[in-house]
Every structure is written in C-alpha cells, then in structure tokens.
Image (cartoon, rainbow, N blue to C red):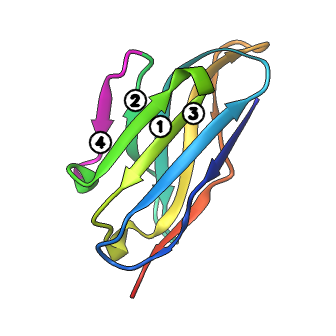
Amino acid sequence: VQLVESGGGLVQPGGSLRLSCVASGSIFGIYAMRWYRQAPGNKRELVAGITSGADINYADSVKGRFTISRDNAKNTVSLQMNSLKPEDSAKYFCNADIWSTNPVRDYWGQGTQVTVSS
C-alpha cells in the first residue's frame, strides 16, 4: 500500500492550494483519512480528518479556511486550503487507516511541502 501526496508549492499569503493524496495497492477498505503537517522544529500536528462515514474534524487553527474531502471510488483524500497564512507553511502528510492484505493499520505518505510567503 502506498499513499502519494501532490499539490504543494509556494503561494502568497491569502492564496489557495489544493492538496491531494491517492492510496494504491491491494486495498480492501479505507477507514479514516487525515492530513497532518509538520514545520521545522515543531511536532507533527493533525490538520483535518474524515471518517469513512464522512464525519469531519479540523484543527482550530484551520477551521473556516481548510476543507477536507474524500472520493471513496478513487481512494483519494483532498485538502482545499484557502486564505493561507505564513504559519501554514509546513510539510503536509497524508495518513489513512487501511485494510489490505495486512490487518488494518495506518499508512503515511512521503509529504508535500507548502510554503506561504510573499
């Protein structure tokens, strides 16, 4: 099983980016999917999560600006990020609980860099 993120880049404050993550491999089912981020010197923090039943939660710092969504048919999770701030700069990681040929466990992507700067 692999998770691959895309969509990061450099954006000015107030701008938008859309991150995507696709899961591939011998997948029988995907449960919760999440986005985390980690800035240099900081702990990895949960940004947003969405369950298989579409229950959603957000970190307080991104509420009203970020939107998480998933496409179960395509095994993807996306993060629409609007009104970006310099403090949103970090490496963003996709994480998902996946049932494959292994028992359910969580998997991580390699991360995609988001830099918010003028």
Which residue is at 67% across, 32% downward?
23
- Badge 1: residue crowd in 10 Å (few <14, some 14–19, many ≥20): many
The residue mark sitting in front, 3 or 2, is: 3
Question: Label 2 belongs to which residue?
Answer: 50
Q: Dots 2 and 1: beta carbons under 8 Å?
A: yes
| Residues under numbered marks 2 and 4 in contact, where contact means CB atoms less than 8 Å apart | no
Instruction: Name which of mark 2 and mark 4 comes first in the sequence.
Output: 2
Look at discs 4 and 3 and give the one toward the viewer: 3
**Disc number for residue 34:** 1
Q: Residues within 10 Å of mark 4 (few under 14, many from 20)?
A: some
Could you tell me residue 12's position as x and y percent?
38, 79
Q: Which mark is residue 58?
A: 4
Distance from disc 2 to disc 4, alpha carbons, whole Å, reads: 9 Å
Residue 54 magenta-drawn? yes
The residue lying toward the viewer, choosing from 72 and 42, is: 72
- Answer with left or right where residue 102 lies relative to residue 34: right
Residue 61, image x, y percentages: 25, 56
The residue type indicated by label 3 comes to Thr
The answer to whether residue 32 of the structure is visible from this angle is yes
Q: Identify the mark nearer the N-term, 3 or 2.
A: 2
**On the image, numbered disc 3 is attached to which residue?**
76
Q: Amino acid at mark 2?
A: Ile
Q: Quadrant of the C terminus?
A: bottom left
Between the C-alphas of marks 4 and 3, the distance is 18 Å
- Find residue 73 and report its image quarter: top right
Q: Amino acid at mark 4?
A: Tyr
Provide the residue span drawn in magenta: 53-60
What type is the residue that disc 1 sits on? Arg
